[in-house]
Image (tube, rainbow, N blue to C red):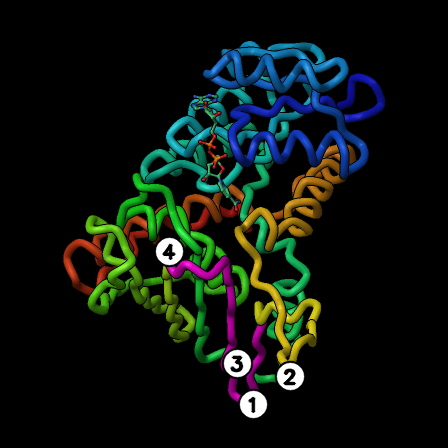
Amino acid sequence: MTTHGTLGVAVIGVGTMGADHVRRINDVISGARVAAVADIDGDRAKALAETIEGCAAYADPAAAMASPEVDAVLIASPGPAHEEALLTAFEHDLPVLCEKPLTPDAASALRVLEAEQRLGRRRVQLGFMRRFDAEYLRLKKVLDEGRLGRPLLLHCRHRNASVPPYFTDAMLINDSVVHEVDCTRWLLGQEITAVTVLRPAPSSDSPEHLGDPQLVIFETDGGALVDVEIFATCGFGYQVQTEAVCERGTARIGEGHGMLTCAAGRWGGEITRDYVERFEDAYDREVQGWVDATRRGEVIGPSVWDGYAAAAVCEAGVTAQTTGRRTTVELAERPAFYT
Ligand code: NAD
């Protein structure tokens, strides 16, 4: 499994997330090294590889995955490039950590689902990192223990200070709310069956092409309702909050009660700037968990099925957004392979 006692990882796509994962593997976690980086921007790959001992640079992800130095692959290229990279990793039978989304739509996600099943065993951990966040893990434990009774509602808030100018309405669902899709499925252990999107009059600070904020409502097959406020241009910072309302109590996370300062007659704290800061520990645990499991010959965490289900819900979400109608989710039957 490992070339030099440690797991030789090829990181595919070294933009914001890929470069951060390279730093993480190099400086933070144990048991792995960055053996190769690949980016269609070959100069970017080369510049990064030069900072890491024994790291080769490629412009072609397939060439990186064919290297004998590479034992596992971390895919951090944009979503539309994931299917090809995943199928190439499968050809080499390499374990994969794939950033979300699995792929940008349900049809391509289904192709990956079928390809992984043909391998006969799971190879992919999907990068829904909130499942590794300490607060989310605590909430999951409370709900699973059942002492608050059955969860009836989830109230979720997902706020970004700002988004790039190319960010679209569909991206609110596919890039942001996709995390609440996965958290809902994971926290409740239920599938999402229908999506409705409601819009207030947009914020005057939101770009003209973006109807921001929006309220996204999920119905689940266990009878729960979930509301998600997505506010991508709130201006003041990055906030992700979830409150579970159960039969005999509530549980809330994401209040951001870190250090409290008192000075000059005021008290206050800080709001994280972005996801890299808010979920730093979760990313560390996610990648360490992947490396440890891979070295044991195991696969943990969110699966290709979770990626497919998220893609199917997001597709319904974008339809609900554009038509203004409640939209049911079309989901294939879950293969026994993923139970
Ligand atoms: P980015 O644009 O900053 O970086 C993408 C990099 O991939 C660029 O360097 C680009 O040149 C390269 N690239 C493009 N096509 C490629 C291909 N076919 N093969 C190899 N490299 C290619 O994007 P990002 O923000 O780093 O996002 C990367 C992935 O991470 C996306 O799937 C995104 O959805 C995901 N992401 C996840 C989180 C999270 O919280 N888990 C947060 C942000 C982004």
Which badge, 4 or 1, comes first in the chain's sequence? 4
Q: Is mark 1 within 8 Å of ligand 1?
A: no
As drawn, the label of residue 150 is 3
**Image quarter for residue 286?**
top right
Most distant residue in the right direction: 5
Residue displayed at 46% across by 61% down:
236
Position of residue 332 measured from the top left corner of the image (x, y, whole percent): 35, 48
Q: What residue type is labelled 2?
A: Arg
Task: Give the alpha-carbon distance from disc 2 to disc 3, as whole Å.
Answer: 9 Å
- Residue 225 forms part of the magenta stretch: no
The reply to whether dot 3 and dot 4 touch (C-beta < 8 Å) is no
Does residue 249 appear to the left or right of 81 in the view shown?
Answer: right
Q: Distance between the residues labelled 4 and 2?
A: 35 Å
| Secondary structure of the residue carrying numbered label 2 | loop
**In the depicted view, which residue is nearer to us: 48 or 139?**
48
The residue that label 4 is drawn on is 232
Q: Report the Cα–Cα distance between label 4 and label 1.
A: 33 Å
Residue bounds of the magenta highlight: 232-253
Three-letter amino acid code of the residue under disc 1: Arg
41 or 72, nearer to the observer: 41
Residue indicated by mark 1: 248
> Residue sitting at 47 percent across and 63 percent down?
184
Callout 4 crowding tier (Cα within 10 Å): few <14, some 14–19, many ≥20: many
Single out the mark in the foreground, 1 or 3: 1
Residue where numbered disc 2 is placed: 147
Give the mark toward the camera: 3 or 4. Answer: 4
